Image: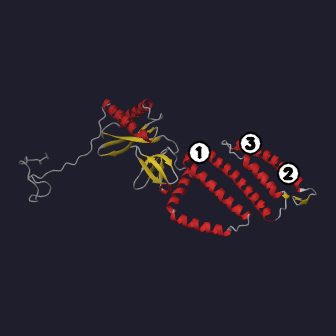
Amino acid sequence: MRLAGIDVDAPPELLLPIIVAGLVVLGLVAARLAQKLAARWLSSKPAVAVPVACAVVFGGLVWVPDIGLPGRLGRWLQGALNIGLVLSCALVVSRVAVAAVTEYVTRNPSMSPAVGVARVSVRLLIGALAIITALETLGVPVAPLVTTLGVGSLAVALALQETLANFFAGLYLLADRPVRAGDYIKINDAQGEEGYVESIGWRSSRLRTLKNNTVIVPNQKLSQAILTNFHLPASPVGMAVNVVVAPGAEPTAVEAALNDELGRAAAELPRLIAGTPVARLADLTDAGQVWSCGFQVADVEAQGPAGHEVRKRVLARLRRDAIALGVPARLVQDRPRDGRVGGAAGGGGGQTDGPSQPGRPDLPR
């Protein structure tokens, strides 16, 4: 009997049980060590003890002794040992890879929608490689099989082009994380959809609008669109409330009144972020002075209620300080003295209800 390429002068009936027992002991030791390492590196503690022990035993029986069984029995036994070794190693790698994916998703909850697809993909990939390796150890030509699978995969990819594009776009969104579950985003396109990201699936993403409706967006469109994420880099957002006062108002008095009222609002309203609101003279128009009152609110959803409260406070303060609001300019169209509207006499206009007063044009009723 040959042992690792060395002739050993001992009967196989005596030496083979000793080798098997030694491999079993070595497999148990390796299994215990592998389980401890897996438990230390991965919190899910994948069960790798049994497949590691089987891989050690099968590998030892394949590589160490040359049993030399005759004919078909020897080929069958050698093939069974090779298949057992390949499947044991594939099972170890699959369980460790799935546990690593689960660990990563646990640390990144935003990728939880893709955890099922990732697990299945890992298992299928490792299983396919294990089958190809096992067939190759048995002497089965795998090149035609791989070619056939390649052609079939190409046909399936062409048939499912749109679905695969959304699938890989979803993986990109989960990996690059331009948006996350819970973020408020706005898609800058013709539709202008906006809302909170509820979930990112393998084909589409779901947005919840402020009206509590659900908008379903394909992942490919979401990954290619220009987005505004109102939760990055932080949830608080800035907003401004414009107020128009009379052209003759004293700017210094207006600024002092607005800044004082904004400071009180920031201290008393819970939706406003504590800080330093500021009022600035933004523009001068025919209607009056345009003042912009800028401040920060907790999030996008707080803009409406916060703006409502700030506007009420600003109007009340302006009334108390006797600061008049601006009045929009109105266009007054004069009528000619003959009672016709627009144009010269005889231009086809309608007559007035009564004669016009001399010395001034008729006023519209």
Circle 2 is placed at which residue position?
A: 17
Image check: 302 left or right of 93? left
Q: Earlier in the sequence, mark 3 or mark 1?
A: 3
Q: Nearer the viewer, mark 3 or mark 1?
A: 3
Question: Disc 1 designates what residue?
Answer: 108
Residue linked to disc 3: 36
* Observer able to see residue 236: yes
Query: 316 or 9, which is in the foreground?
Result: 9
Q: Nearer the viewer, residue 78 or 49?
A: 78
Contact flag, marks 3 and 2 (Cβ < 8 Å): no
Q: Which of the two residues, 326 or 153, is positioned nearer the viewer here?
A: 153
Mark 1 or mark 2, which is nearer to you?
2
Is 7 situated left or right of 186 in this image? right
Q: Residue at x 60, y 53 (%)?
A: 120
Q: Residue at x 48, y 51 (%)?
A: 205
Q: Residues within 10 Å of mark 1 (few under 14, many from 20)?
A: few
Q: Residue furthest right?
A: 9
Q: Nearer the viewer, residue 22 or 159?
A: 22
Q: Residue at x 75, y 58 (%)?
A: 80
**Picture coordinates of residue 84 (x, y %)?**
74, 56
